[in-house]
Image (tube, helix red, strand yellow):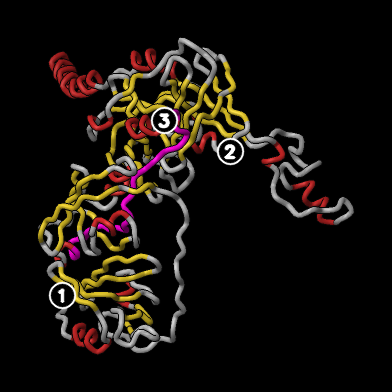
Amino acid sequence: MRVSGLRKLFVLAVVVLLPAVGAASSLPDFTELVERQAPAVVNISASQSASRALPTLPGIDENDPMYELFRRFVPNFPGGPRGDAPGERSRGSGFIVSEDGFILTNTHVVDGADEVIVRLADRREFHATVVGTDARSDVAVLRIEARDLPTVVIGNPEALKVGEWVVAIGSPFGFDQSVTAGIVSAKGRALPDENFVPFIQTDVAINPGNSGGPLFNLRGEVVGINSQIYSQTGGFMGLSFAIPIDVAMSVQAQLREDGRVRRGRIGVAVQEVTRPLAESFGLERPEGALVGGIEPGGPAALAGVEVGDVIVLFNGREVLSSSELPRIVAAASPGSAVDMVVVREGRKESIRITLGEWDDSPRAVSVREKPAPVAPNRLGLIVELPAGDEGGAPGLIVREAVGAAARADLVAGDRLLALVADGRQTPLREVDAFESRVAALEDGEVITMLVARGSGTLFISIKAGE
């Protein structure tokens, strides 16, 4: 009985362990990938001169009582702690893309640096020249004077699948040739203020010093440049973002050839098509980029694009969301003529447009004063005619927005230009007519308005009775 019991226990243990053994055997082995590709990954150290790194302080005489306070506690203050230390230094990673010394990294790694040192995997060090940087994509190109260098193999990020294994090699916290692995969490991520890069999201551990390093697929091909993390603590929290390598290679080609990056533009402000907006514009699905504003005299205006058009196809590429349009447009060459398809009043129309060139010049935004509040209507709005218009140009000024209107992001100073239904826009010119329309709304009914704000326009939907 004792032997039989032990035998049963052994069989049970084997049955329990077999799935674990099978799972372990199916995990990828990264050793060969690292041996082949690590020699092309570099450590980058960028520094500013001490004079540029000093804090900006008012002139303080040595006899001033505040002088001693600054001297003791302000870093880099002359005569104070680390007063004789070199300037600010940043560290990052990079990778070699050509045998004659061209290297890719992030702009934020070398931005403003007076000296850039590149250390190879074989411990050789070189002073690097910054060939060019592009802040919008966060891609920088460096050059070192060397020959017959190991290089990476460029892959195709379009072929990446969510759930696929990927590997990062870099120098987190200065620890050279560190390897981390994970999976692709998502593709085509749009981040705030990053309109031109469809980021690859992964759960690969990325920390300070990994910036600019390569992201490899299991074939040992570079598919991205590790650039950012999302964190509430400053440390890695499982959300890392990489610039697709095709975007980076396009940027580096322009930087090497022209020293700058040219991007197409059409001169529109777009917004996401929500389900209420899709219903208001007669769309089958909430897809495309809704044109909320058009730059006067810009490419879109000259081509006949109208506020309320929904762009669904641009230069042969489908536009599923508003975040996709800027990078699709930017990828086209300024001055080229392309076709795009818009939905206008429920019908598709083809428009040919000649692209302008993107620039970063700031545009003025008007600011309106907020009048005294009065009792709001059932949407939470108080509106009035613009001063001096008196039945001329359409539009009602929002004096106050509370309740449902505030939740829909309407604010005092907005100008309500038109009501939208079935893709058609009815100009708003009379307060009484607008209030009557609002009073007739049934609970749960959605009303969509074209709203002017500052120098742009957008569409906003509000559900009555909320």
Residue 187 visible in image: yes
The reply to whether discs 2 and 1 touch (Cβ–Cβ < 8 Å) is no
At horizontal 56% and vertical 14% (from top left) the residue drawn is 124
Q: What residue does disc 2 label? A: 112
User: x, y percentage for residue 148?
Assistant: 46, 10
Residue 320 visible in image: no
User: x, y percentage for residue 263?
Assistant: 37, 43
Q: Is residue 97 magenta?
A: no
* Mark closer to the chain start, 2 or 3: 2
Residue type at mark 2?
Gly
Q: Which residues are magenta?
A: 256-277
227 sits to left or right of 110: left
Quadrant of residue 161 within the rendered picture: top left
- Look at the image and tell me in which quarter the C terminus lies: bottom left
Q: What residue does disc 3 label? A: 252
Give the residue furthest to the top.
148
Residue type at mark 3?
Gln
Q: What residue does disc 1 label? A: 445
Viewer-side label of 3, 1: 3
Compare residues 227 and 250 and report the one nearer the observer.
Answer: 250
At horizontal 45% and vertical 37% (from top left) the residue drawn is 260
* Number of other residues with Cα within 10 Å of mark 1, as a class: few under 14, some 14 to 19, many 20 or more: few
Viewer-side label of 2, 3: 3
At horizontal 54% and vertical 37% (from top left) the residue drawn is 111
Viewer-side label of 2, 1: 2
Q: Is residue 268 magenta?
A: yes
- Look at the image and tell me in which quarter the N terminus lies: top left
**In whole angstroms, how far apart are the C-alphas of marks 3 and 1?**
51 Å
**In whole angstroms, how far apart are the C-alphas of marks 2 and 3?**
19 Å
Q: Using the image, determine if residue 349 lies above or below residue 176.
A: below
